[in-house]
Image (cartoon, grey):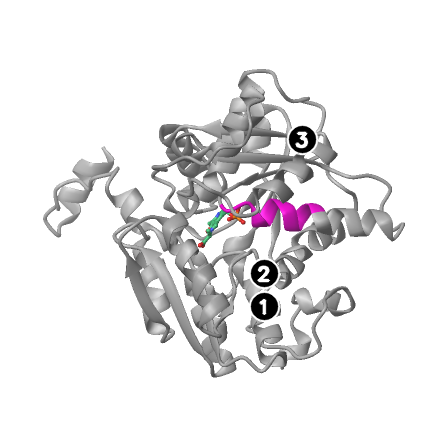
Amino acid sequence: FDGKNVTLWKYKSWLPVKSRVSLNEGGTPLYKLKNLEKGFGVEIYAKNEGANPTGSFKDRGMTVGVSKALELGMDKVICASTGNTSASLAAYAARAGIKAYVLVPSGKIALGKLAQAIIYGARVVPVRGNFDDALRVVVEASAKLGVYMLNSINPFRLEGQKTIALEIYDQLGFVPDNIVLPVGNAGNISAIWKGFKELYEKGITEKLPRMMGIQAEGASPLVRAWKTGEKFKPIEKPETVATAIRIGNPANWPKAWRAVKESGGLFESVSDEEILQAQQLLASKEGLFVEPASAASLAGLIKLLEIGEVDRSESYVLITTGHGLKDPNVVLNRFTLPEPIEPTLDAFKEVIR
Ligand code: F0G
């Protein structure tokens, strides 16, 4: 049955692995956001990566990365994670029958992601510190303890994730003017840029999109360097409601910088409030429930439209990177339910009066 589903393995000749540990990842929907388009007067699409098997784009990288781990004969894999990478690695390691260790910032990982990593059978290791601290340990462990590292510093992860670009081109039938996406450890923006460049270099497409990287204000080292012209400096204590991108020292920052520079794009930051409002807008206007980090893409586009930084006659594809159900607390902390009613028609009539 597996072969009949449309997955990213449609592009297997573009991927540097022979074997395949798969949960049928990729092949995610691309939506035209008709209601938001009416409101904002620009052409907007969303690539819904929450539709992947574990609910985020990380599955694209993990199917390739874990396949490679098996090819290399590794039986232990490891990652640091703000949540989604750990959920994804745990699932693919389970599928491959190997052991996964996932290091996560203690108390700062969304509930859904934690539940996933646990039930898929990974060894979940909470770390007293943030993502950047956990990644430092993981890099050392992979060098010294013979465990295979599957953070996005691993190039095979990015190979899988570049298929987002290939799918967008297939689905639209043209290359959009702009790709707008959240930036955390800065792997995905680099991967998607690589995908569009390969399409271009093979002569399949005749243009390249601009890459627009959006960070949360409290975790925006790339935006700071971009806007001030100062040398890149990590943020010591990153903080944001979008825990997925609560990262102060993005490991792939040089690659992301090049992607933005070469493509003529930009980096921008958005506040937590702007992120939460964009999350609500995507859900209530388009039926698309994404986690806060993913909503940073729409928040970024709205900000850029407001300050007149972008061209209204162009097309924008938002990468909505993770499913909203990953982080239910963010919603439930913001909204309260009314008091219960008596189970009678009269009581309900009062409600809709
Ligand atoms: N959106 C979501 C939902 C994420 O989980 C991440 C990264 C990003 C965006 C940013 O992507 O790191 O490639 O720039 N999450 C990682 C994790 C760090 O551990 O799950 P990036």
If the image is split into quadrants, where does the C terminus sit?
top left
Q: Quadrant of residue 280?
A: top left
Name the residue tied to disc 2: 154
- For mark 3, what is the residue? 265
Whether label 2 touches label 1, CB < 8 Å: yes
Q: Nearer the viewer, mark 2 or mark 3?
A: 2
In the picture of the structure, the residue carrying the numbered disc 1 is 65
Q: Which quadrant of the figure contains the N terminus? A: bottom right
Q: Secondary structure at mark 2?
A: loop
The magenta stretch spans which residues? 185-193
Q: Nearer the viewer, residue 287 or 74?
A: 74
Q: CA distance from mark 2 to mark 3?
A: 25 Å
Q: Give the total number of marks visible in the rendering.
A: 3
Farthest-out residue, front:
144
Mark-to-mark CA distance, 3 and 1:
28 Å
**Circle on res. 174:** none
Which residue is rendered at x = 55% and y = 45% of the image? 186
Q: Amino acid at mark 3?
A: Gly
**Residue behind label 3 places its C-beta within 8 angstroms of ligand 1:** no
Q: Is residue 216 above or below residue 142?
A: above
Residue 332: x and y in percent read: 25, 44
Q: Is residue 185 at all visible to an observer of this figure?
A: yes
Q: Main secondary structure of the magenta part?
A: helix
Say whether residue 138 is left or right of residue 298: left
In the image, 290 versus 82, the foreground residue is 82
Amino acid type at mark 1? Gly
Could you give the CA–CA distance between mark 2 and mark 1, rounded to whole angstroms? 8 Å
Residue 134, x across and y down, in percent: 38, 55
Which badge, 2 or 1, comes first in the chain's sequence? Answer: 1
Q: Is residue 45 left or right of residue 146?
A: right
Secondary structure at numbered mark 1: helix
